[in-house]
Image (cartoon, grey):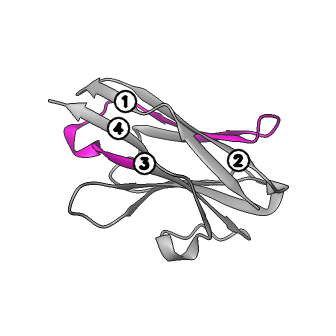
Amino acid sequence: QVALVESGGGLVQAGGSLSVSCAASGRTFSTYVMAWFRQAPGKDREFVASISWGTSSTYYADSVKGRFTISRDNAENTVYLQMNSMKPEDTAVYYCAARTGSYHSKIPNEYAYWGQGTQVTVSS
């Protein structure tokens, strides 16, 4: 049974930085793709970034490219999302997700495992 637990959300001013973490347990994740999605009120869940656990290859949504960085710590089985130069439109609940294989899907339904989400709020 895969379990994903996010932490680190909170309130930050526009232009500031915040980091969220996702602790994964229950599997050997070397063949998984880990991703961050976000969902703002009244909007669909959208892809933010993904990382291959085995190769560390990464992909980013255009809206966060150059501002956000996804990384992972194998020893801690933890995935991080460092968010810099934050904007009010980054305000959302951020979810960690996992899927088997090497394909970096941007479609939420293609991820089998999800965390409970952590709120990130950026004030203007």
Q: Contact (CB < 8 A) between labels 4 and 1?
A: yes
Figure quadrant of the C terminus: top left
The crowd level at tag 2 (other Cα within 10 Å; few <14, some 14-19, many 20+) is many
User: Which residue is denoted by mark 2 in the rendering?
Assistant: 24
Which residue, given by chain and number where applicable, does mark 3 sit on?
94
Q: Position of residue 42 (x, y in %)?
A: 20, 62
- Disc nearer the start of the sequence (4/2): 2
Task: From the image, tell me which residue sits under label 1.
Answer: 10
Q: Are marks 4 and 3 in contact (CB under 8 Å)?
A: yes
Given contact means CB atoms under 8 Å apart, are the residues at marks 2 and 3 in contact? no
What separation in Å lies between label 3 and label 1 (alpha carbons)? 11 Å
Sequence-wise, the earlier of marks 4 and 1 is 1
Residues under numbered marks 2 and 1 in contact, where contact means CB atoms less than 8 Å apart: no
Is residue 45 left or right of 80 when viewed as pictured? left
Distance from the alpha carbon under mark 2 to that under mark 3:
15 Å
Q: Which mark is residue 120?
A: 4
- Residue type at mark 1: give it: Gly
Q: Earlier in the sequence, mark 3 or mark 1?
A: 1
Q: Residues within 10 Å of mark 4 (few under 14, many from 20)?
A: many
Magenta segment includes 75: yes
Q: Is residue 1 visible in the rendered structure shown here?
A: yes
Residue depicted at 73% across the width and 61% down the height: 32
SS under mark 4: strand
Between disc 2 and disc 3, whose residue precedes?
2
- Proximity of marks 4 and 2: CB atoms separated by less than 8 Å: no
Let me know if residue 107 appears in the view: no
**Mark 4 belongs to which amino acid?**
Val
Q: Residues within 10 Å of mark 1 (few under 14, many from 20)?
A: some
> Which residue is drawn at the image coordinates 56% and 53% (left, top)?
115
